[in-house]
Image (cartoon, rainbow, N blue to C red):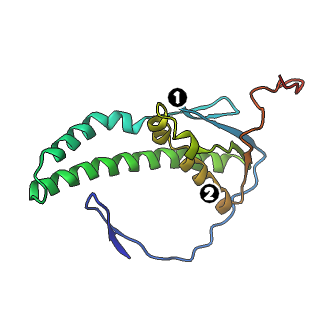
Amino acid sequence: TISRDPAGRHFVSFLVDESIKALPVVNAMVGVDVGLKDVAVLSTGEQVRNPKHLQRSERKLAHAQRELARKQKGSKNREKARRTVARIHARIADQRLDGLHQPTTRLIHENQVICVESLAVKNLVRHHALAKAISDVGWGELVRQLEYKAAWYGRTLVRIDRWYPSSKRCHVCGHIL
């Protein structure tokens, strides 16, 4: 299949039947807590910083969108401006995907069991003040990538219930406040 995205980039996709070998068993587990300041905070204490791709490109995007709004509908210059806006959006999306593929692949290769909280991202995005920041982090994509990579490489992904009182439970005795 040959396709073209709104930015004018062409893609060729074809179906290949490939068997992916399971990675050797490792004796390691990790818990992943997602956040806005850090994309993920691991139970080992490591933090994966949030690069904020949209926030860094916002001025350029706003400028391009203003230019597009000024163009006459149906003109060649409007089409060029539309493609410029689409290119900026595509660049942000590609940066976000690449920025999530790297830590998820590393987590899958280094750990046998990965525990991640199951968040209702769709509901959280409804919050007017945090919607853009939550979308820019890409929590849903992070969990989706962990799921399919765990299935590919023979790892275990554990989704912890969102109502589990982990922050109210004492890590020593287990008492819940």
- Residue 155 placement, left or right of 174: left
- Residue 72 placement, left or right of 145: left
Q: Residue at x 39, y 38 (%)?
A: 53
Spatial separation of the CA atoms under disc 2 and disc 1 = 25 Å
Q: Residue at x 63, y 45 (%)?
A: 107
When the figure is inspected, residue 90 is found, relative to residue 61, above or below; the finding is below
Query: In the rendering, at what x and y percent does residue 17 appear?
Result: 56, 77
Front of the two marks 2 and 1: 1
Per the image, label 1 sits on a secondary structure element best described as: loop
Q: Residue at x 43, y 35 (%)?
A: 52
Per the image, label 2 sits on a secondary structure element best described as: helix
- Residue 159 placement, left or right of 71: right
Query: In the rendering, at what x and y percent does residue 46 appear?
Result: 62, 31
Query: In the rendering, at what x and y percent does residue 81 appear?
Result: 17, 50
Q: Residue at x 29, y 60 (%)?
A: 6
When the figure is inspected, residue 173 is found, relative to residue 123, above or below; the finding is above
Q: Quadrant of the N terminus?
A: bottom left
Q: Nearer the viewer, residue 174 or 15?
A: 174
Q: Residues within 10 Å of mark 1 (few under 14, many from 20)?
A: some
Q: Nearer the viewer, residue 106 or 92?
A: 92
- The residue tagged 2 is 149
Q: Residues within 10 Å of mark 2 (few under 14, many from 20)?
A: many
Q: Amino acid at mark 1?
A: Lys
Query: In the rendering, at what x and y percent does residue 25 appear?
Result: 76, 54
- The residue tagged 1 is 37
